[in-house]
Image (cartoon, rainbow, N blue to C red):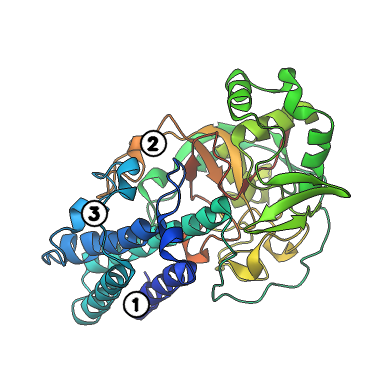
Amino acid sequence: MRSTDELSAWVRDARRRTLELVADLDAGQLLGPRLPIVNPLGWEIGHVAWFQERWALRHAAGRPPLRADGDSLWDSSAVPHDARWDLPLPDRDGTLAYLREVEESVLALLRDRPTGPVRYFTRYTVHHEDMHDEAFACTRQTLGYPAPTVSASPRPEGVDAGPWPGDAAVPGGAFRLGAEEDDPFVFDNEKWAHAVEVAPFRIARAAVTAGEFAAFVEDGGYSRRAVWSERGWAWREESAALHPVHWRRADDGWERRDFDAWVPLEHDRPVIHVSAYEAEAFCAWAGRRLPTEAEWEMAAATAPGRGGLDPSRRRFPWGAEEPTPERANLDGRGGGCLDVAALPQGDSAWGCRQMIGNVWEWTASDFLPYPGFVADAYRDYSAPWFGTHRVLRGGCWQTRSRLLRNTWRNFYTPDRRDVWAGFRTCARA
């Protein structure tokens, strides 16, 4: 259980990160174009404060609303996505004043009445803000805004560590997928651990690199109908994709857009901003496949033992210790991805590198409820998206380290390319 002082520090830290991610943007940028994959940032920063007020102050502590119009402006379950550009939102100063008022009220509540529900829902809202902060950075990338300046630790050593080829052999067997009931905090879609049987498999020690993916592009991968699934090919034709979304050809090779700047493609860093359909097509071209989420979690959370698997489970690939800069590239540190061979201290027991941090990893698994699923108090977190989304695992360089563990499930529709998502592969049986 996190202490009240630590929760208070998290509240301050999350709000500081939110403000850093929009501090340099003008009114036009805070509104932005009407796109299905982004929110207007001016609306979204108000939403994270409203969500914290809704659950920590009103639900957990029984407080009255701070604004009479808050629900009509910022309730994402009630306000349609396309309507968010047309709302009578407060101006920038008014929105920031609301963020400050909510923060101060929550901190005072933690100081004066830190009940169990207050502590739980404060933590829930901090993690909600963490997820939106990552979305803010994705929006800046999508819209070509300058890279954000955030307070994070310096970039770790070994950035240019090179490739990390090869597979790890995992013997498979009986495995408990998901979070155990003694975990102090998990989201509803991680509940609860249940027995699955996993066949032996071989999984790549690292995510697919940009250089490896460039070979697929250069070999005409986007025009090879045979390597695309039916849905994937329909997406490729509709999107007219010929290469990853933020790539372009230059005189001396490929470049990618990093926020508002074009940079030479870093061949030993993971490929990012690819959809699940692109990942599947690469796998078919390479004679590989995506891992299931059970395979991914087994490779991250288990260790060798007598006759196969050790019965104990790891919270993180490297063990029980919290993420550090030497183990995982998280928290917006250093402004981007590292080479796939970096950070050997974060290896799983099977030798898989960067299973936490650097880049989200698509899996082959649809986002579905675990057996006996019961929605948490915020019912719209998981349940509306079952059956239409695909599971991603591991986190990316923008993800906050306090959010993650081996059982954490992210989920997006398989066409999404705005996320900092890549993938690792498995050998075909």
Type of amino acid under label 2: Trp
Classify 10 Å Cα crowding around label 1: few (below 14), some (14-19), many (20 and above): many
Q: Amino acid at mark 1?
A: Ser
| Distance from Cα at disc 2 to Cα at disc 1 | 31 Å
Say which amino acid is labelled 3: Leu
Q: Which residue is drawn at the image coordinates 68% and 23% (left, top)?
A: 228
Specify the quadrant of the image occupied by residue 174: top right
- Residue 223: which numbered mark, if any? none
Q: Are marks 3 and 2 in contact (CB under 8 Å)?
A: no
Query: In this figure, which residue is indicated by the disc labeled 3?
Result: 73
Kindly state the secondary structure of the residue where label 3 is placed.
helix
Disc 3 and disc 1: Cα gap in Å?
27 Å
Q: CA distance from mark 3 to mark 2?
A: 23 Å
Name the residue nearer the viewer: 409 or 168. 409
Asked if residue 15 is positioned above or below residue 388 in the image, the reply reads below
Label 3 or label 1, whichever comes before in sequence order = 1
Image side of residue 360 versus residue 60, left or right: right
Q: Does residue 218 appear in the picture of this structure?
A: yes
Q: Nearer the viewer, residue 152 or 202?
A: 152
Q: Which residue is mark 2?
A: 385
Tell me residue 243's x, y (percent). 72, 37
* Residue receiving disc 1: 8
Residue at the location (51% across, 34% down)?
196
Quarter of the image containing the C terminus? top right
The answer to which of marks 2 and 1 sits earlier in the sequence is 1
Q: Is residue 112 above or below residue 43?
A: below
Q: Earlier in the sequence, mark 3 or mark 2?
A: 3
